[in-house]
Each structure stands twice: as structure tokens, then as C-alpha cells.
Image: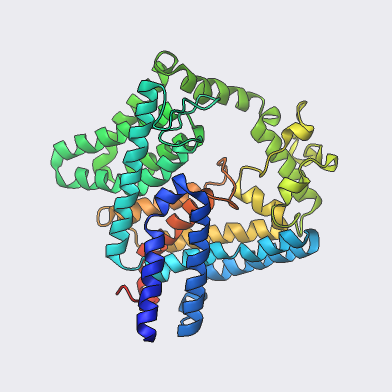
């Protein structure tokens, strides 16, 4: 009876996790419910079965310390609502551990998830081209106000969704083509990757495009048979950007004109103002930050309306309340504003522990899937990236899914010996 209950728990959790890429596009509240339910089921099963090997992993220990620091900071600096949210923050770490040692250790489940990711990526590509050609998507929406394509969505999330699904869902197929089909396979792989780059250019979201190009660069270094094709893709991609003033003027304005303007006057750009505001908050509250989600609540306070003289950065002329947003658009600054320098340091340590585990014994020619999972995890934690908030969906879901999947595919997962109903 007990074994049957455990099998049903595993089946329920697996059935919830496999469609997560679709939920992260179309149903953010259900996606958050999935994260919470799976975390609770995993925690309950670990207690009942007294299986705690996973708790001794370095990344879990550091994650626990980070969680504790966020809770402590929220108790010192936050209100009752913030303290409750800080306590619930640990569900993300439990969800990652559940993917690693309970749901995804089985290769067949990971293969199913990879097919779901690939299918979602193809769906996004098709939706983006439909909107580019016809001017509207399946929901009847045109481009976003800043010129970004929505694809088959109703908000400008197609770029991040395509990056998070295409690299683990389609890139492994391109690598296998280049390895198995000779010159023909290399041409087909390059054509596939070129289609993704062109789609990203049309989508006109800078950070997902930069991250995808970064992923291609890493693949080019580690997979020799794809280097020539990736060089050609890079040249053709640059050509598409050069032609974008004619073919996609809105994309050109956002990718090139707007980017140059922001870099020329960074302190007065939206991203520069957020960087300065977060830096001031961390400077004034170095040990505890401002508690859970403190940036959002404290940003309009005039006490933080000044620059960072020790960095030679002044508050831009358009600062003040106009420099506010719901979050600082960077994971590391977010942790610093929530829990001070200790939280930022622990988050850096957590990233290092995850990357060391995930990159261990990665052999690109032997397992392209593992390689691409490691590449994506590396890119999503790139410290100078502009990001959405780690505290909300879909960002938290994408990050937790890819981290747990990559950990489950690593040799560490097989050594944890967590027997479940799906074995």
C-alpha cells in the first residue's frame, strides 16, 4: 500500500512537471501551483522515506544558507507579508531538488521532456514568423509597443521562451546531425540554427538574442564539427541585422538604435537607473538588505535618489521616481537588495556549486543534451545580463526547470540512489 502511494505521488509529480514549458507560456498561476505542489510532495516523501542524501550536496547546503539569510533579513527589515514570502521562497530549491533526485533521474522521462521543449520551441518560431508575415498572431495581436514580436503569446515573452526551449530542445538535434550525417548533416544543422537566429532578430528582444548567440559561441568552441556552420550562421545573422532597417525597421530600432543610445548614456537609461538604485540600497543596507522583495517597496523612497560616488557613477538627470521598477533586472542585485552582501555572496556561491556539478564530466560528442543543459544554465546566470524577476513566473519556473534537469542528467544524480515509483 505504501509503495503504491509512493508510485502515485511520483506519477502525479511527473505529470505536472512534463507540461511545464507550456504552462510557463500560457498559464503562469498554474505553473506556480505546480512548483509548490511538487516541492511539498517531494518534501513529504523525503520525510516519510527518511531519504536525506540529497541534503548533503554542496548546492543544497548553500541554498539553505541563502534561504536562511533571506528569512533573517525579512525578519529584521520586512513586514509580516514579506516574512511569509521569504519562508515560501525555499519552495524553488525544493522543486529543483525534486527534479534532480526524484522526477528526472530516469532517462526516458528526460527524453520526453526534451521533446516537449523542442515542440514548444518550434511552436514559438512558427508563431513569430506568422506575426512577422501577416502582422498579427493567432490571438489577433500585433507587435508590442516597442516593436518586439509576441509570437503566439499576448505579452513580449517570446524571446526568453525561445531561448529557454530551443537550446535544450533543438540544439542537441543540430549537434547530432552534424556528427552523424557528414557534410549534409552539417549543412542541415547550420540551417536549423540560422533559422533560430533570424527568428530572434525579428523578435527584437536584445538579451535573449545575445544569450542565444553566446550559446552558439560556446557550442562552436566545444563541438568542432559545427564550427564552420556556426561561423556562417554568425555572418548571415550579422547580415540580417544590417538589412533590418529595410526588412524589419522596428527590430532594427530596438536592437541597434535603442541599444546604442542606452550604452551611450547608461546612467540615464532605464537599466542604468535600476543599477544605481540597487547599488545605493545595498550600500546603505549591506548586511541585511531590505528584506524579501525590498527593492519594489523601497525604490520610490527619495533617500535612495543619489549615485554611487565610489564607482564614479552619478544619478542621471532623469532619475528619481522614474528610475523605479518592480525589481532591479538582475539576479545578483536582486539578492543584494533582499539580503545584503551576505545574500549576494551566497547566491554567487550557489551558482558556482551548480555549475561545478553540472559541468562535471560533460563530453560534448557523447551527450549533446547534457552539453546544452550546461550551456543554458551557464548563460542564465551570466552576471551582467538584464533579467526578469527571479521571484515570479515565468522566470523562476524556467530557471528551476533547467537547473533541476541539468542536475538530474549529471553523474551526481545517479549516486544519490533515490528509488521512486518510475524506476
Q: Residue at x 78, y 46 (%)?
A: 298
Above or below: residue 314 compared with residue 390: above
- In depth, the one of 219 and 84 nearer the eye is 84
Residue 271 horizontal side relative to residue 177, left or right: right
Find residue 329 and report its image quarter.
Answer: top right
Can residue 286 be seen here? The reply is yes
Q: Position of residue 122 (x, y in %)?
A: 31, 40
Q: Residue at x 15, y 37 (%)?
A: 183
Q: Position of residue 326 (x, y in %)?
A: 67, 43
Residue 222 horizontal side relative to residue 78, left or right: left
Residue 20 horizontal side relative to residue 423, left or right: right
Q: Position of residue 207 (x, y in %)?
A: 50, 36
Question: Which color mode does the image show?
Answer: rainbow
Above or below: residue 352 compared with residue 417: above
Q: Position of residue 44 (x, y in %)?
A: 50, 77
Residue placed furthest toward the right: 303
Residue 70 horizontal side relative to residue 394, left or right: right
Q: Residue at x 69, y 64 (%)?
A: 84
Above or below: residue 132 compared with residue 22: above
The number of discs equals: 0
Q: Residue at x 57, y 23 (%)?
A: 258
- In depth, the one of 68 and 349 nearer the eye is 68
Find residue 292 and report its image quarter.
Answer: bottom right
Quadrant in which the C terminus is drawn = bottom left
Above or below: residue 137 compared with residue 71: above
Residue placed furthest toward the top: 246
Can residue 413 be seen here? The reply is no
Quadrant in which the N terminus is drawn = bottom left
Amino acid at each position: 500500500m505504501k509503495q503504491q502511494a509512493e508510485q502515485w505521488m511520483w506519477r502525479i509529480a511527473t505529470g505536472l512537471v512534463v507540461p511545464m514549458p507550456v504552462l510557463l507560456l500560457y498559464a503562469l498561476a498554474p505553473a506556480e501551483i505546480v512548483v509548490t505542489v511538487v516541492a511539498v510532495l517531494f518534501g513529504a516523501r523525503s520525510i516519510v522515506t527518511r531519504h536525506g542524501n540529497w541534503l548533503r550536496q554542496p548546492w543544497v547546503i548553500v541554498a539553505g544558507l541563502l534561504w536562511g539569510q533571506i528569512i533573517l533579513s525579512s525578519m529584521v527589515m520586512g513586514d509580516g507579508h514579506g516574512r511569509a514570502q521569504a519562508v515560501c521562497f525555499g519552495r524553488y530549491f525544493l522543486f529543483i531538488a525534486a527534479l534532480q533526485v526524484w522526477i528526472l533521474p530516469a532517462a526516458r522521462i528526460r527524453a520526453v521532456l526534451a521533446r516537449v521543449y523542442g515542440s514548444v520551441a518550434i511552436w514559438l518560431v512558427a508563431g513569430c514568423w506568422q506575426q512577422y508575415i501577416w502582422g498579427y498572431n493567432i490571438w489577433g495581436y500585433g507587435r508590442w509597443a516597442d516593436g518586439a514580436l509576441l509570437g503566439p503569446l499576448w505579452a513580449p515573452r517570446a524571446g526568453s521562451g525561445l531561448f529557454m526551449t530551443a537550446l535544450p530542445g533543438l540544439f542537441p538535434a543540430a549537434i547530432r546531425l552534424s556528427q552523424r550525417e557528414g557534410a549534409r548533416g552539417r549543412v542541415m544543422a547550420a540551417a536549423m540554427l540560422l533559422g533560430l537566429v533570424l527568428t530572434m532578430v525579428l523578435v527584437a528582444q536584445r538579451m535573449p538574442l545575445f544569450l542565444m548567440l553566446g550559446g552558439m559561441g560556446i557550442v562552436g568552441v566545444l563541438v568542432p564539427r559545427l564550427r564552420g556552420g556556426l561561423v556562417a550562421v554568425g555572418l548571415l545573422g550579422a547580415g540580417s541585422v544590417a538589412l533590418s532597417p529595410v526588412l524589419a525597421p522596428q527590430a532594427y530600432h530596438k536592437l541597434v538604435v535603442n541599444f546604442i543610445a542606452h550604452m551611450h548614456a547608461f546612467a540615464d537609461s532605464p537599466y542604468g537607473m535600476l543599477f544605481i538604485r540597487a547599488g545605493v540600497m545595498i550600500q546603505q543596507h549591506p548586511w541585511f538588505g531590505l528584506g524579501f522583495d525590498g527593492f519594489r517597496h523601497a525604490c520610490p523612497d527619495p533617500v535612495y535618489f543619489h549615485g554611487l560616488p565610489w564607482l564614479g557613477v552619478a544619478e542621471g538627470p532623469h532619475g528619481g521616481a522614474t528610475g523605479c521598477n518592480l525589481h532591479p533586472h538582475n539576479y545578483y542585485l536582486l539578492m543584494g537588495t533582499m539580503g545584503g552582501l551576505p545574500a549576494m555572496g551566497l547566491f554567487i556561491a550557489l551558482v558556482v556549486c551548480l555549475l561545478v556539478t553540472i559541468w562535471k564530466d560533460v563530453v560534448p560528442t557523447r551527450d549533446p543534451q547534457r552539453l546544452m543543459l550546461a550551456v543554458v544554465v551557464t548563460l542564465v546566470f551570466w552576471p551582467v545580463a538584464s533579467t526578469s524577476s527571479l521571484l515570479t513566473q515565468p522566470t523562476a519556473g524556467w530557471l528551476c526547470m533547467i537547473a533541476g534537469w541539468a542536475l538530474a542528467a549529471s553523474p551526481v544524480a545517479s549516486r544519490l540512489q533515490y528509488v521512486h515509483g518510475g524506476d
